[in-house]
Image (tube, grey):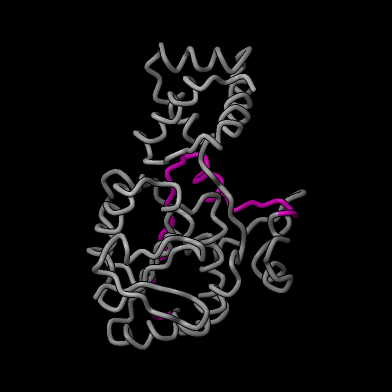
């Protein structure tokens, strides 16, 4: 371990100020490992040299690289399969009935990392809801990391990534080989709008949302930022729109009393009361 407690507190403070992420002392090893790797990638001799540059240079790109290195980018296709099965069989059919007159549908996958979650939603829409061809559908995906967004827009994944949760028949139908990787076909890529959004900062203009996926995001933030984000979500959701968090996350209605729990099979969702 090459990082001191004081250095850890310094990085901890940067992450809290920049993106609202709170790291406990149990993540000291993670900071040490990831920033040591970042130092090597930037051609520096040590983690200490990276920390010295952070403290003495006003470099937005360096700050962004540090934030990117420390973000938790765990994702995969059809992550939490019961959720996506319920999205297909219960949630989307309910919303399509409610939105039948308007013939509009808006979905936002926040903190999308390298894009597997929004592409999973796009594949579900394409495969199981052909009637949406005549609808105005917006599928928005956002992340704070420009690096992750660039990778998501490209839509190229390793064999390991496409074999984690993605059924073979969907892989064969909606992906094509690109060298050693798998490339999502343009018909799916074009369904997703990628935006760089810091959830703890000012949000750009967004449409009213029918389904908001905020899964495994708020668990990394402090209560102040959790409540601030949920207050914004409350104003953004369509009437009868749904908010979804991760399976193990704290109940959102404890952070914002305007949300009520909606049980959809094995899945817990939230709607504004």
Image quarter for residue 76?
bottom right
Residue 37 image offset from top left, x and y in percent: 63, 27
Residue 74 image offset from top left, x and y in percent: 58, 50
Q: Where's the C terminus, which quadrant?
A: bottom left
Q: Is residue 216 above or below residue 257?
A: above
Which residue lies at the image location 37% right of the left edge and 17% below the top edge?
A: 58
Which residue lies at the image location 39% right of the left edge and 62% below the top edge?
A: 108
Q: Is residue 173 above or below residue 197?
A: below
Residue 130 seen anywhere in this rendered image of the structure: no
In the image shown, does 56 or 23 lie closer to the viewer?
A: 23
Total labels drawn: 0
Left or right? Give the position of 70 relative to 78.
left
In the image shown, does 59 or 55 lie closer to the viewer?
A: 55
Q: Is residue 93 magenta?
A: no
Residue 23 image offset from top left, x and y in percent: 47, 38
Magenta span of residues: 133-160
Left or right? Give the position of 126 relative to 179.
left
Residue 113 image offset from top left, x and y in percent: 52, 50
Q: Is residue 144 magenta?
A: yes
Left or right? Give the position of 190 relative to 183.
left
Residue 86 seen anywhere in this rendered image of the structure: yes
In the image shown, does 18 or 65 lie closer to the viewer?
A: 18
Which residue lies at the image location 68% right of the left edge and 65% below the top edge?
A: 165
In the image shown, does 211 or 21 lie closer to the viewer?
A: 21
Q: Where's the N terminus, which quadrant?
A: top right
Which residue lies at the image location 48% right of the left edge and 56% below the top edge?
A: 216
């Amino acid at each position: 371990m090459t990082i001191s407690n004081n250095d850890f507190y310094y990085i901890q403070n940067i992450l809290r100020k920049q993106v609202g992420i709170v790291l406990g002392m149990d993540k000291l090893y993670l900071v040490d490992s990831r920033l040591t790797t970042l130092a090597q990638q930037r051609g520096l001799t040590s983690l200490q040299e990276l920390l010295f540059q952070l403290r003495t240079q006003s470099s937005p790109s360096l700050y962004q690289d540090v934030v990117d290195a420390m973000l938790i980018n765990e994702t995969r296709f059809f992550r939490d399969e019961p959720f996506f099965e319920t999205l297909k069989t219960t949630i989307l059919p309910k919303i399509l009935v409610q939105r039948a007159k308007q013939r509009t549908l808006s979905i936002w996958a926040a903190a999308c990392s390298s894009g597997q979650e929004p592409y999973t939603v796009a594949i579900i829409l394409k495969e199981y809801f052909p009637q949406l061809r005549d609808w105005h559908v917006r599928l928005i995906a956002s992340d704070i990391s420009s690096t992750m967004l660039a990778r998501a827009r490209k839509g190229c994944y390793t064999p390991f990534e496409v074999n984690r949760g993605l059924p073979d028949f969907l892989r064969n139908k909606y992906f094509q080989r690109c060298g050693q990787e798998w490339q999502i076909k343009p018909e799916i890529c074009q369904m997703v709008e990628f935006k760089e959004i810091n959830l703890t900062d000012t949000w750009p203009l967004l449409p009213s949302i029918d389904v908001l996926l905020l899964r495994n995001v708020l668990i990394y933030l402090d209560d102040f930022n959790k409540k601030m984000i949920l207050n914004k979500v409350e104003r953004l959701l369509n009437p009868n729109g749904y908010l979804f968090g991760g399976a193990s996350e704290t109940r959102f209605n404890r952070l914002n009393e305007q949300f009520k729990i909606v049980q959809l099979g094995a899945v817990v969702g939230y709607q504004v009361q």
